[in-house]
Image: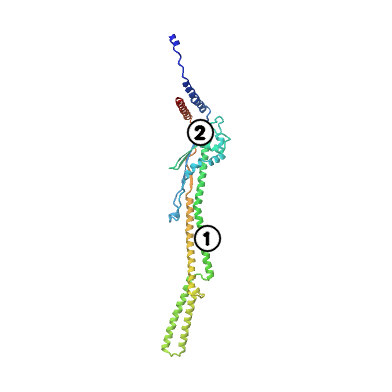
Amino acid sequence: VAQLYDIAPTAAMPRRHRGVLYSFVLLVFLPCVLGTGYLFMRAADQYASTVAFSVRKEDLASPIEMFGGIAGFGASGSSDADILNGFIASQEIVRALDDQLGLAELYSKPESDPVFAYRRDGSIEDLHDYWRRMVRVIYDPGTGLIEVRSLAFDAEDARAIAAGVFAESARLVEELSQIAQEDTTEFARSELARSVERMREARARLTEFRSTTQIVDPNADVQGQMGLLSMLEQQLAEALIDADLLRESTRAADSRLKQADRRIAVIEARIADERSKLGFGGRGGDGADYAMLLGEFERLAVDRQFAEEAYTVALAAFDAAQAEARRKSRYLAAHIRPTLAETAQYPRRFMLLFMMCFFLTAVWAVGVLVFYSLRDRR
């Protein structure tokens, strides 16, 4: 047996196999060992806090719409939940919470964890990038529900960050509500101001017309003059009858017949004079001028009536806009209050370790295959 061992040479590992083994140890095994040591010995525990909320509106029918629906108002193109989803991931909320809570100090607490902790001397852009790692937003566009999970190295800090996100979101919703109320009432307010100015101008023009012509109502003036003409024509008819009766019963030289003819002439002259007065409503002129005067008065009266009706409609629309702004109040409703964690669930060490080892192994295997493929082609 001894002779057999002396005769058979010891099998040596080929050189290229040793290279593959050394590369595996160097590129996969050692990094995985170092990663395991870091994750389980130096990586700081992270606590999670969850808050979930949605934007609510009060959509009740206003009394003005119940009595006829004078005005209608459309909804905005983007929903409030979409705006909040973008706001929570923005730099604005990071800066606001950094001023309130000191995010840079909270995220840089673990001194011995340079991988997961934040650098204190980072810029706001660096803090924003780190925020996107530590805060996750889950948004369902169908229901409008938003869930925010915040991580921190202390359970109280995680809950404070989640509460700060909720408070800043509520502030933004209140601002959106105020903007919506101002937009709803601004147009109605401007239309009301225009209708008031139009009504004031129409009344001023009608007052100027009355002051210039000394006529309050040409229609009433015409009716009065027509009444006077009717009375004179009636008196003329009576005088003519009396004169005819005298001619039948007396001589032509009778003084009473002359007096009756004189009375008829006076009445006819008065009728002609009163008819001529219709030109300027009691100030003389021709009928055409008076017709133009009456047409101008009717035009001014129609303008005033239209302005008053437009003012009534604008006032009702303004009241409806104010009611619409009051009744569509937005508010943030939290169905999950910021939670306080009792155990650290992050970082997920086993999952990170598995992903790191799998990735390194895959890269190493692809690299080996490429190397030997190129070598065999030479």
The residue at which mark 2 appears reads as 47
In this orientation, which residue lies closer to the viewer: 14 or 283?
14
For this orientation, the residue located farthest to the right is 121
Q: Position of residue 222 (x, y in %)?
A: 47, 73
In this orientation, which residue lies closer to the viewer: 130 or 361?
361
In this orientation, which residue lies closer to the viewer: 31 or 41?
31
User: Element type at marker 1?
Assistant: helix
Which amino acid, mark 1?
Answer: Glu
Mark 2 closeness class: few <14, some 14–19, many ≥20 residues within 10 Å: many
In this orientation, which residue lies closer to the viewer: 101 or 22?
22
Quadrant in the picture for the N terminus = top left
In the rendered picture of this protein, how many numbered marks are placed on residues?
2
Q: Nearer the viewer, mark 2 or mark 1?
A: 1
Q: Position of residue 318 (x, y in %)?
A: 49, 55
Residue 221 appears in view: no
Which amino acid, mark 2?
Answer: Tyr
